Each structure stands twice: as structure tokens, then as C-alpha cells.
């Protein structure tokens, strides 16, 4: 009482099976990839190597990718562009930005005036979801999410970036030849 | 370095200053040859891991090891250092003596065989004994003992299962391997491996042309003998962790690997010398030996032999990274229902073809057999008859095998199981266990 009706193979199918045609086809494919890895440079349409050597060759991220934050500085005076307006902290849906301003005395037209300037800037990357709403809110293009994606640290506290890290960039170990 | 390429008679005169002539011939030279072969095989076993990783990477559009040295060429050395410094663990409940001894058997069995492999004529072979082929077959199957001992003494279920699998696999594939050689031996008329190669040389042909079926079966059963994919059931990592060497670590583990790669070389060397003409390549003899360059001839012969072996070893890697593993019943099926009948058919067909050639010899002035001095030397007509018989025999074998196996339903165990379960069950009703009925009536 056969439950599944398996059709008897035809003569051609039997010959194909005996001479292992399908096996040879598969072996042809792997050979193509093997030779392609040595000769072919085209990995998308051809048979070239698809992987990238990450620490040596950095991956190309998409143009709209948002990564590590940075506080931009005036390229001429090297003063910070931040005016401590707190708009980024207000825009942040995760509440991960703390702007700590301080007042300094400056002389404007001979009279002493107080001015609010940036003292410390805390950016918690462990809570950041990289929506870049802070970047949108910044009136002076100071806060910017860069394309850098290496954010891993050894401790939880390392995720909290202070002003110095945000301005200078965090130190990462670069692969050398 | 210079001494490596210098003709041996210079080294000979150097050695004769220190030793007796008899000692040089029978002790010193064999030791030099053994040292060279063992070193070469050990280096191969190291770099086979590199080759395997590279080839597998290329076949999967990856790069493979790239960091240690240029193109990762120093990776095997880093691996060796790692393995040597690892802790050598013995499980608590294992049989300590056998557990520690099994890797040595494995390596010894794999390396002893190189004594009779004919890498080249003259000084290219360590010893040429007249039962070389039997020696290779018998010693290489001792390696299986190591696997069984390792699997048993580990006192681990996975290791034991690996050992059992390897023993069953060996039993079924040893037969096909031995029988597939008979066809080639009918042409060579000797069991000495050098004799087989020189039979092909004097006939100026490779036996693969006469014996395509034998070559195919030998290669398949050789791969099964070496526990390589697609027949790597004894160490199937996706089913039984690592099979027989699950409990091994460090250098003992790597000894098993060395043995595996050395055994691969043995099977490749056997296939080369039996079917691919060994060190014989048309033109090499005429260019060198005939002009008096004897040592150049030997060195070129070694190169030819190693190149042919390299093609076969690449095939090993190629197959491993192309084909999925056989299921256990499929493995037995292939061995007993396909390979062994194929070899038997091959023996009969070869014998008939040789009989035909002998009968045609001298009939109406045809001359098919040249001489019987070095194997079966055929003339042009005889060769054509043999080649046609050999390749036509493939179709005959296919027919016979499909006739034998016409009832075997393409490994379809599912139908068989359903048939067993549904005996005496009315159609459309669910099957009820038979034992359940009487117990309910008693209560």
C-alpha cells in the first residue's frame, strides 16, 4: 500500500544519476567561485570575494547614516560653536543630552555684562537612538552625528561622552599594517 | 639547500668517508629518504589546514586567513604553537593508556605507508617491495583501529558513536576499495607499486583510460576510507560534536588531524600510481634520461608525481566544500548496493576484454599484444579495444546496477515506515495501537 506514489525514473534520469551529472554541476559552481576569488574582481555580478577586511578597510556606510556625536568648533578660532541654548536637550526624545552652561562676565561697550557659555556637555550614547533630532534643532550646526560607527566600550560608564570627547573624538585603536 | 639539488653521487662520496658502503646503501640513504618524506608530509599536514581554510573561503566568496603573515601564510605555525601549548586533558573516566596511545597508532599507520609509495624511479622510492599494494591496503586499515580505540577509550557517548560509525564504514568501503584495484592489476600483472607505474610507462598509457570505473570507485571509497566529507560520518560535527576525537585536546587532537591529512596523501598517491601513471609523463624520459641526465629525471619525476597528487588533493577539498554529508543508511546503501556490484562488474568486463584481446592476437594477422614482460603491453589496436571496452563498460555497469537496484526506492524510507505502520488499518481511519484494546476489556 504505497502512500506516496514515487514515479519510476526514466532511462535518461537513471543515466543522469549514474554519471552524477547534478553532482558535477554543483562542483562546477564551486569551482567557478574558487577561480573567481582568484581572478574576478566583481563580487556583485561576478564570482569575486564578497567580504571586506573590516579593520583594514572600513565599511562604506549610507549617506544618511547617523553615528557618533560630535561638537563642531569654529575652524578659525577653535572656539566651540555651541551657544548653550539647550535646544538639543529639549529636542531629544530619549533625554540623553545634558547641557551645563555657565555665566561669564564680558565687557560690552564698556559695561560688564553676563553671558551664558557652554561649560560641560554630556551625551549618553547608550541611550541615544541616533534619530538626529538634536542635529536638526541645533541653530549653529554645532552638534552633529557623524558617520563613525565604532561606539563599543569596555564599561557602561564609557558610553557617556563628555565635552572633551565630543570635541576631540574618542580614541580608538586603529589597525596598522 | 645546494645539497638538496646536488646529484646523490656527490653526497654518496661524502657519506662514504664516514660509513661502510653497505651501511650507506642500506642504513644511511633510507634514513635520509625517510627523513625527507616524513618532513614533507608533516609540512603538508600543517599547510593542508591552511589550504582547506583558503579553498573553503574562496568557494564561499570569502577571504580566509589573512592576518598572520602575508595572505595568512604563517597561520599554520600560529596554530601549531597554540596546540602545543594547550593543556593535554584526559577525561576522568577514560581509559588513560589507550586514550593516550590511540593518536600514535593513527599517525604511525598513516606514515608507515609512505615507505612503499613510488615518488620516482631509482632513489625516489624508499623501498620497493613486491607486495607493495597489499602492504598499503593492510597498513592503512590499521588506522581505523586507532579511531575505534579513541572512540571507545574516551568513555563518551559521542566518541563511541563516532568510533562505531567508522568501523562500520571501513568494513563496507574496504571491500570496494580492494576490489576496484583488481582491474588495474590485470594490466600491471604485479603488486609492486613501482612495477605498476613502470607497466604504464612501458605501455605509454595511464590506466585511467582502461579503467575509468575502477578509478571512480577507488576515489569514492578512498574518500570514505579517509573519513572526508561527504563521508565524514565518524566526526560529523553537526550530529555528534566531533565524533571519535570529541574528548581530545591539544597536540593529541592535532595528531589525529595529521593522520587524516597524511592518509589523504596516501590515497592520492595510490590513485596516482595506479591510474594516473605515477611519475610517468610523456616526454620526460625522452628529454632527460635518454640524454644522460639521470638525477634531473628523478627530480622531474617527483615533481610530476606531486603535481598529479595535488590535483587529486584539490579534488578532496573541492568535494568537501561542495557536497553535503551522507545520511548513515545512504552511506551503507552506496557502499553495498552500488560500489561493490560496480567493482564486480568491472572485474568481469575487464577480464572479458583481456580475453578478447588475447583471442584477437594473431587472428588474421592482427597483432594486439606486444609483450608480457612489463605488465600487459598492448599494441595500438589492443589499446583502442581496451579503451573502448573500458569507457563502454561504464554504460554496461550503469545498466547492470540499475537492474540490481530497480526496487530500491531512491532512499525513500518514509514510504517504508508508512507501510509498516498502516498494516491492517482500515483506509481513512486513524491507526490505533494494538496493545491498547485488550487492557481496556480486562478493566
Image (cartoon, rainbow, N blue to C red):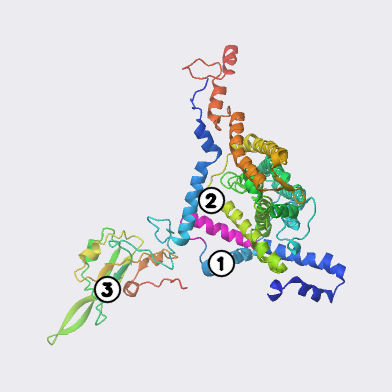
Q: Is residue B202 above or below residue B327?
A: below
Q: Position of residue B213 (x, y in %)?
A: 63, 42
Q: Position of residue B169 (x, y in %)?
A: 67, 41
Q: Which residue is mark 2?
A: B321
Q: Is residue B95 visible?
A: no
Q: Which residue sits at x=46%, y=73%?
A: A176
Residue B347 part of the magenta segment: no
Q: Is residue A157 above or below residue B58?
A: below
Q: Position of residue B280 (x, y in %)?
A: 67, 57
Residue B73 marker: 1
Instruction: Judge by depth and name the residue closer to the eye, B32 or B142.
Output: B32
With B436 as the anchor, is B129 left or right in this view? right
Mark whose residue sits in front, 3 or 1? 1
**Label 3: element kind:** loop
Q: Is residue B405 visible?
A: yes
Q: Which residues are magenta?
A: B42-64
Instruction: Judge by depth and name the residue closer to the eye, A139 or B349.
Output: B349
Amino acid at each position: 500500500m504505497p502512500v506516496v506514489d514515487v514515479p519510476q525514473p526514466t532511462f535518461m534520469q537513471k543515466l543522469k544519476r549514474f554519471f552524477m551529472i547534478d553532482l558535477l554541476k554543483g562542483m562546477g559552481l564551486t569551482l567557478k567561485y574558487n577561480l573567481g576569488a582568484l581572478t574576478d574582481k566583481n563580487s556583485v555580478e561576478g564570482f569575486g570575494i564578497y567580504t571586506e577586511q573590516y579593520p583594514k578597510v572600513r565599511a562604506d556606510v549610507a549617506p544618511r547614516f547617523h553615528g557618533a556625536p560630535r561638537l563642531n568648533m569654529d575652524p578659525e578660532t577653535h572656539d566651540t560653536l555651541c551657544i548653550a541654548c539647550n535646544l538639543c536637550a529639549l529636542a531629544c526624545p530619549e533625554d540623553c543630552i545634558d547641557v551645563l552652561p555657565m555665566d561669564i562676565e564680558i565687557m560690552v561697550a564698556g559695561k560688564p555684562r553676563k553671558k551664558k557659555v557652554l561649560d560641560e556637555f554630556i551625551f549618553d550614547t547608550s541611550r541615544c537612538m541616533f534619530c538626529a533630532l538634536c542635529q536638526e534643532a541645533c541653530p549653529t550646526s554645532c552638534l552633529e552625528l557623524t558617520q563613525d560607527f565604532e561606539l563599543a566600550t569596555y564599561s557602561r560608564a564609557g558610553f557617556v561622552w563628555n565635552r572633551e570627547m565630543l570635541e576631540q573624538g574618542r580614541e580608538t585603536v586603529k589597525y596598522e599594517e | 639547500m645546494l645539497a638538496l639539488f646536488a646529484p646523490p653521487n656527490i653526497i654518496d662520496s661524502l657519506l662514504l668517508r664516514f660509513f661502510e658502503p653497505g651501511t650507506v646503501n642500506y642504513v644511511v640513504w633510507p634514513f635520509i629518504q625517510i627523513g625527507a618524506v616524513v618532513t614533507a608530509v608533516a609540512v603538508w599536514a600543517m599547510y593542508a589546514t591552511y589550504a582547506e581554510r583558503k579553498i573553503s573561503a574562496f568557494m564561499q566568496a570569502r577571504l580566509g586567513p589573512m592576518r598572520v603573515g602575508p595572505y595568512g601564510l604563517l597561520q599554520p605555525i600560529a596554530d601549531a604553537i597554540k596546540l602545543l601549548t594547550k593543556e593535554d586533558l584526559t577525561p576522568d573516566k577514560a581509559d588513560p593508556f589507550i586514550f593516550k596511545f590511540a593518536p600514535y597508532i593513527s599517525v604511525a599507520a598513516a606514515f608507515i605507508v609512505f615507505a612503499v609509495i613510488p615518488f620516482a624511479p631509482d632513489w625516489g622510492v624508499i623501498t620497493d617491495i613486491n607486495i607493495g599494494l597489499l602492504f598499503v591496503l593492510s597498513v592503512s586499515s590499521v588506522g581505523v583501529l586507532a579511531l575505534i580505540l579513541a572512540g571507545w577509550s574516551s568513555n563518551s557517548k559521542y566518541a563511541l558513536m563516532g568510533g562505531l560509525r567508522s568501523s562500520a564504514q571501513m568494513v563496507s568501503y574496504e571491500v570496494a576499495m580492494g576490489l576496484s584495484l583488481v582491474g588495474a592489476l590485470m594490466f600491471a600483472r604485479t603488486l609492486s607499486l613501482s612495477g605498476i607505474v613502470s607497466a604504464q610507462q612501458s605501455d605509454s598509457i595511464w590506466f585511467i583510460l582502461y579503467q575509468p570505473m575502477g578509478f571512480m570507485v577507488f576515489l569514492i571509497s578512498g574518500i570514505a576510507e579517509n573519513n572526508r566529507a561527504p563521508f565524514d560520518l565518524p566526526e560529523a560535527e553537526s550530529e555528534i560534536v566531533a565524533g571519535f576525537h570529541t574528548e581530545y585536546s591539544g597536540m593529541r587532537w592535532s595528531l589525529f588531524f595529521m593522520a587524516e591529512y597524511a592518509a589523504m596523501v596516501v590515497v592520492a598517491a595510490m590513485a596516482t600510481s595506479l591510474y594516473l601513471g605515477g611519475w610517468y609523463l610523456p616526454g620526460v624520459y625522452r628529454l632527460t634520461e635518454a640524454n644522460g641526465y639521470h638525477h634531473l629525471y628523478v627530480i622531474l619525476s617527483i615533481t610530476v608525481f606531486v603535481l598529479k597528487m595535488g590535483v587529486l588533493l584539490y579534488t578532496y577539498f573541492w568535494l568537501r566544500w561542495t557536497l553535503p554529508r551522507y545520511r548513515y543508511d545512504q552511506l551503507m546503501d552506496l557502499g553495498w548496493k552500488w560500489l561493490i556490484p560496480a567493482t564486480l562488474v568491472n572485474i568481469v568486463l575487464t577480464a572479458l576484454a583481456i580475453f578478447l584481446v588475447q583471442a584477437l592476437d594473431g587472428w588474421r594477422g592482427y597483432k594486439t599484444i606486444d609483450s608480457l614482460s612489463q605488465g600487459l603491453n598492448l599494441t595500438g589496436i589492443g589499446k583502442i579495444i581496451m579503451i573502448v571496452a573500458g569507457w563502454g563498460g561504464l554504460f554496461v555497469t550503469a545498466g547492470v546496477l540499475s537492474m540490481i537496484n530497480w526496487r530500491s526506492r531512491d532512499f525513500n524510507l518514509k514510504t517504508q515506515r508508512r507501510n509498516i505502520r498502516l498494516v491492517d488499518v482500515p483506509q481513512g481511519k486513524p491507526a490505533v495501537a494494538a496493545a491498547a484494546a485488550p487492557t481496556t476489556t480486562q478493566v
